[in-house]
């Protein structure tokens, strides 16, 4: 039976010792009299989320029934940030199989397709030359300014558009300084924690009431104090399309997940570069959320947008500006953002690019900075953002 | 102690096994799934089938967990100390007269085993959830005011439901047996409808279910669920209708689709495009 447990773990289901002990206890009680019951028992004990049901069923089938398991799909975001892909890309660049220009122009799927082709088939070295150049067409993103479409690569690309990152690595070094990292996560958390409004005065202060009552010679006087609980709702919208954001996504998620305790509700949404009337509930940006639903939120809901705000000016200003072909939205990004700001007066934009580099990086940063209060994703920036949100929030919490 | 379901509630064999395993292992059973799949109902059925009394806690977002165990009524005591407790029989010097027990407290203090339902746990804070699970796992809580420990005389059968409005925390999930109740497929739905309308004619039932499942597939914001189906069939029978209607002419559509947007979509009215 222990083999089954490891089998589950290999399939990606988190297993703890506690489950194993429970499983054995249940077996000893004779709760699994046949295979069906064993299946249910094991699922009850080991699987806690419906997302894992499918994986579990396959693992169970392959272990007990000898069926073929399938490999779980890999999230492409992870893949791109991962080492094999980056290594492959570097090799391609060094060997001249791909030129930096091509990297910039191909979109993600294209690059990934090539990656699979060469790495998985193990044929990469033999092709050589310029076989691929021009054979698979250009990036579909071409219509809105080229440098926005390319993938931002070269090791840990942190800032800037792909062009700058590949040609000119001067941004890479300083970006690590005192921006968000595991080490200063705790400090950032502490400052986020002060993002709590005071509740209504509904809690009875018993000590104070008794003291007052005694002083009043027994005439009861009830003293209420503000409830300190946080009833705050928080929306976090993450730009996970640009690779300048990729290194920060796990960190940002950790922070806000830890904050779930003190917020009533933390919801994550994802977008790519700019918002055009849709944000997505999943990192792959497939499940979209109705715009009306988002902007009809209570005005006291806090909104934190996190993104580099760095895009081709056309993406922000022009009609049909989205860099994605599937988007055909006439209203320019700027107006959508304005709408968002009106719906969420208590909002702030956090930018992974450091403040002193904003002017240099892109004009769109300033444009967006005029709509949303913008801070950078450093400790000081987060502190600023939090105090800004607290001040703004006071007006709306009372309503 | 074997749970077998009752004549008013259709219990899939899988769910029956699961309930029995959870009872045998003495673990809280966390039920998730779409609204209208009978999560809450299951707890009532367990209580009826096993002949156990029910303690029910409908969770609210303001809960801190403690009020489910006990409430200490300070204001009443203060009032009594000032104005006297009169004929009520309460003694101001005795704190027990001012402690009121919540569902968990009652389930723990009862001599008999009870079914404890924590409905829609996801409405509460994650702190509250963790506190509650501590209490349930240890089978005891402490009345802070007098530092008195209340221990369960009988471990209750604990059923927790969640609409998954919010993710539950991992430690919470770890302590429960979790089961996702899928939406019943047509053949199970037939049995369910027959439990409520034993004399329904076969053709009507078939027609209704066909329309119902077709509607569910159309991606409405709030797809109709079991409760809506039963209301709908009830309405059709009440009004003496012979069939569910077809196309845009489905009768009593209001019982199936509750949201204005869904209704408009069903009638084919397009909202003004925003682009």
Image (cartoon, rainbow, N blue to C red):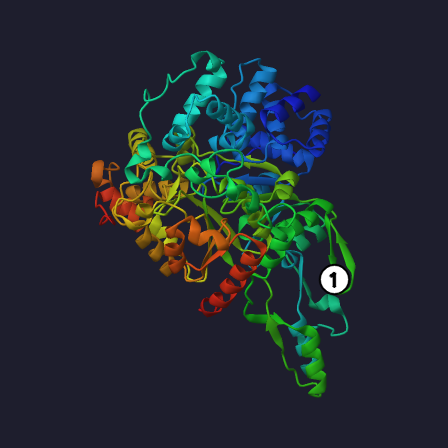
Residue drawn 25% across the image and 36% down it: B243
Query: Splitting the image into 4 quarters, where does residue B34 fall?
Result: top left
Q: Quadrant of the N terminus of chain A?
A: top right
Q: Locate residue A217 relative to residue B170 in the image: left or right.
A: right
- Give the class, few, some or many, for how many residues have Cα within 10 Å of label 1's Cα (few <14, many ≥20): few
Give residue A206's position: percent from left, percent from top: 68, 73
Query: Splitting the image into 4 quarters, where does residue B3 fall?
Result: top right
Front-most of residues A298 and B35: A298
Q: Which residue is mark 1?
A: B144
Query: Splitting the image into 4 quarters, where does residue B205 fall?
Result: top left
Give residue A293's position: percent from left, percent from top: 37, 51
Task: Describe the element under mark 1 as helix, strand or loop.
Answer: loop
Q: Locate residue B161 relative to residue B109 in the image: left or right.
A: left
Residue drawn 65% across the image and 82% down it: A220
Q: Locate residue B147 relative to residue A372 in the image: left or right.
A: right
Residue drawn 72% across the image and 84% down it: A214
Give residue A120's position: percent from left, percent from top: 49, 17
Q: Residue furthest bottom?
A: A217
Vertical placement of residue A225 versus A33, above or below: below
Front-most of residues B273 and B51: B273
Q: Quadrant of the C terminus of chain A?
A: bottom left
Vertical placement of residue A341 versus B172, above or below: below
Residue drawn 57% across the image and 51% down it: A260
Q: Is residue B85 visible?
A: no
Front-most of residues B108 and B218: B218
Give residue A94's position: percent from left, percent from top: 49, 24
The chain under label 1 reads: B
Number of disc labels: 1
Front-most of residues B63 and B9: B63
Q: Is residue B144 visible?
A: yes
């Amino acid at each position: 039976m222990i083999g089954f447990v490891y089998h589950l773990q290999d399939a990606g289901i988190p297993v703890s010792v506690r489950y194993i002990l429970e499983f054995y206890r249940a077996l000893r009680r004779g709760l699994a009299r046949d295979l069906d019951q064993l299946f249910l028992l094991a699922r009850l004990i080991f699987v806690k989320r419906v997302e894992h049901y499918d994986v579990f069923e396959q693992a169970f089938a392959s272990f007990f029934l000898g069926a073929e398991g399938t490999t779980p799909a890999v999230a492409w975001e992870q893949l791109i940030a991962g080492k094999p892909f980056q290594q492959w890309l570097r090799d391609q660049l060094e060997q001249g199989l791909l030129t930096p220009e091509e990297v910039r122009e191909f979109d993600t799927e294209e690059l990934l397709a090539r990656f699979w082709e060469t790495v998985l088939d193990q044929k990469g070295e033999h092709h050589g030359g310029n076989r691929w150049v021009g054979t698979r067409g250009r990036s579909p993103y071409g219509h809105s300014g080229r440098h926005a479409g390319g993938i931002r690569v070269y090791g840990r690309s942190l800032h800037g558009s792909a062009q700058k990152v590949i040609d000119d690595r001067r941004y890479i070094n300083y970006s690590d300084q005192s921006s968000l990292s595991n080490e200063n996560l705790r400090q950032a958390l502490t400052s986020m924690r002060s993002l709590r409004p005071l509740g209504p005065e509904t809690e009875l202060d018993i000590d104070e009431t008794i003291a007052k009552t005694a002083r009043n010679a027994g005439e009861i006087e009830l003293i209420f104090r503000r409830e300190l609980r946080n009833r705050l709702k928080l929306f976090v919208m993450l730009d996970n399309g640009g690779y300048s954001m990729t290194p920060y996504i796990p960190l940002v998620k950790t922070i806000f997940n830890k904050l779930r305790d003190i917020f009533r509700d933390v919801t994550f949404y994802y977008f790519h570069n700019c918002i055009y009337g849709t944000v997505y509930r999943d990192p792959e940006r497939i499940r979209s959320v109705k715009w009306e639903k988002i902007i009809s939120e209570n005005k006291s809901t806090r909104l934190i947008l996190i993104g580099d705000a760095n895009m081709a000016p056309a993406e922000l200003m022009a009609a049909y500006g989205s860099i994605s072909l599937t988007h055909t939205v006439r209203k320019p990004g700027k107006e959508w953002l304005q709408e968002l700001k009106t719906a969420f007066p208590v909002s702030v934009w956090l930018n992974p690019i450091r403040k002193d580099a904003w002017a240099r990086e892109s004009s769109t940063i300033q444009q967006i900075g005029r709509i949303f209060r913008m801070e950078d994703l450093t400790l000081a920036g987060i502190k600023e953002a939090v105090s800004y949100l607290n001040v703004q929030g006071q007006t709306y919490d009372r309503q | 102690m074997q749970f077998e379901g009752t004549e008013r509630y259709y219990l899939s064999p899988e769910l029956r096994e699961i309930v029995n395993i959870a009872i045998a292992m003495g673990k809280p059973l966390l039920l998730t799934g779409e609204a209208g799949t009978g999560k809450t109902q299951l707890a009532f059925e367990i209580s009826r089938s096993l002949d156990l009394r029910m303690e029910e806690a409908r969770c609210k977002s303001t809960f801190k967990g403690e009020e489910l165990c006990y409430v200490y009524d300070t204001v009443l005591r203060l009032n009594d100390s000032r104005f006297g407790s009169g004929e009520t029989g309460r003694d101001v010097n005795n704190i027990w007269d001012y402690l009121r027990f919540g569902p968990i407290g009652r389930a723990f203090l009862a001599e008999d085993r009870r079914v404890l339902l924590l409905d829609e746990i996801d409405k509460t804070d994650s702190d509250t959830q963790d506190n509650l699970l501590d209490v349930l796992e240890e089978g005891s809580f402490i009345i802070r005011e007098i530092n008195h420990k209340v221990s369960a005389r009988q471990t209750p059968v604990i059923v927790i439901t969640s609409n998954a409005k919010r993710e539950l925390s991992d430690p919470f999930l770890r302590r429960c047996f979790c089961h996702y109740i899928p939406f019943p497929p047509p053949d199970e739905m037939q049995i369910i409808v027959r439990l409520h309308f034993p004399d329904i004619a076969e053709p009507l039932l078939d027609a209704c279910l066909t329309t119902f499942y077709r509607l569910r597939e159309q991606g409405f914001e709030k797809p109709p669920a079991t409760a809506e189906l039963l209301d709908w069939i009830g309405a059709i029978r009440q009004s003496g209708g012979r069939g569910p209607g077809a196309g845009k002419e489905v009768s009593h559509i209001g019982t199936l689709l509750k949201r204005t947007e869904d209704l408009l979509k069903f009638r084919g009215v397009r909202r003004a495009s925003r682009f």
